[in-house]
Image: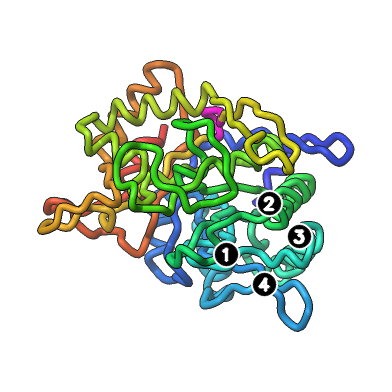
Amino acid sequence: MLLLASVLCMGAVCSASPDPRPVLAAYPNWGMCDDRVATAIENGVNTVIWFQVNLVSRDGRPHVDPGSLDLACVASVAAAARRNGSAVAHYISIGGWNAPHPDAQFTGAEWYQAWVAWNAAAKAPGFDGFAGFDWDLEGHDDPDHPNNYFTDGVLEIMKTMSLLARGDGLKVAMAPAQSYLDAATGDFSQSVSHPPVEPWHQEFRYHGRNVYAYLLAACGVDTFDFVSLQLYEGFSGAGYHLTEGESAEAYLVDLVERYTRGWTVHFDQVPHLGLAAQAVAVPADRLVLGFGNAWATPPPITGDKKFVFIGADDIRAAWSALRAGGVAVRGFMWWALVHEGESVDGRPVVFSEQLNFIVRP
């Protein structure tokens, strides 16, 4: 499962060439493992980001807690996919909305060793354990909750675990909300209690200011196999531009250009972290566009556009326009498989089929 041949190590520093296959990544749901995941793999999903684990203290030791996720079921689905000849990368997500941030009484190195031991114990016949992990640390509904701030300790854990995992030939991904890695602003903050950068819904104070850009600067973008951008964040930049009438195709093409070109992030706005203002970018071969499926449509009565839905036709048009310009993004991600087959305007949304038709050769 690990593409170790693509990893070139020099001392303690490793650089990895991304898997050349387009990524078609899906999150099942909190604790979900059932036939719907197997069906999605049959339809073309080649990356399953199982949801999720928390890094918590138990009995005074670092403990990787899978919550309601049935690891035996994960192993069974993975083994069946292998028997059927499907090449699937299985990641485990760390975090999620309202989920606890890692306990910073332990270092990143201690958490990494705990994760490695936990992953080894998850192995089963036909399942080699998780290929790596996906950072999905986010904020909390309670505006006063401490998880709405990424502490120095949490950032150290994320950085150190990422570097150690990559050095061992494991895969590391991240899935920031759009405002947590935002090419529309150079501002930087460890808080994710800001209003949107765009001039709308200033009462909604759950946005970040490039906190995940810290990982790109501190670790290097090559540490991450791919970066999935959650365009379905509440009142996201994507939602604003589409609500203002910009076409989804034009917006996605422009967004890819901005992220791949790069932008200056003012890390010096938080001087104690020791990072100078610098340019960050996500190369096209590591950029994954993340979408919400049918759940993200506005309710028909209120028309509330807190979440943005971008359908397969618009995604296909953007993909074609990018390819025509010589740009190939790494692929697509969506939340969540639990909503596969639900309808928008009377048409079933089955991204595992529809997006596979777009990216397959």
169 falls in the magenta region: no
Q: Nearer the viewer, mark 4 or mark 3?
A: 4
* SS category of the residue bearing label 1: helix
- Reading the chain from its start, which is encountered first: label 4 or label 3? 4
- Reading the chain from its start, which is encountered first: label 2 or label 4? 4
Residue bearing mark 4: 56
- Determine the CA span between mark 3 and mark 2: 14 Å
Query: Where does the image place residue 107, in percent across and percent down from the top left?
Result: 79, 60
- Reading the chain from its start, which is encountered first: label 1 or label 2? 1
Q: Nearer the viewer, mark 3 or mark 2?
A: 2
> Do the residues bearing badges 1 and 4 touch, measured as CB atoms within 8 Å?
no
- Determine the CA span between mark 1 and mark 3: 23 Å
- Determine the CA span between mark 1 and mark 4: 15 Å
Q: Nearer the viewer, residue 193 or 243?
A: 193
Residue depicted at x 44% and y 23%: 257
Residue depicted at x 29% and y 39%: 240
Q: Quadrant of the C terminus?
A: top left
Q: Amino acid at mark 1?
A: Pro
Q: Nearer the viewer, mark 1 or mark 3?
A: 1
Magenta span covers which residues? 282-286
Q: Amino acid at mark 4?
A: Val
Residue bearing mark 1: 146
Residue bearing mark 2: 155
Within 10 angstroms of label 2, few (less than 14), some, or many (20 or more) residues?
many
Q: Nearer the viewer, mark 1 or mark 2?
A: 1
Residue bearing mark 3: 112
284 falls in the magenta region: yes
* SS category of the residue bearing label 3: helix
- Reading the chain from its start, which is encountered first: label 1 or label 4? 4
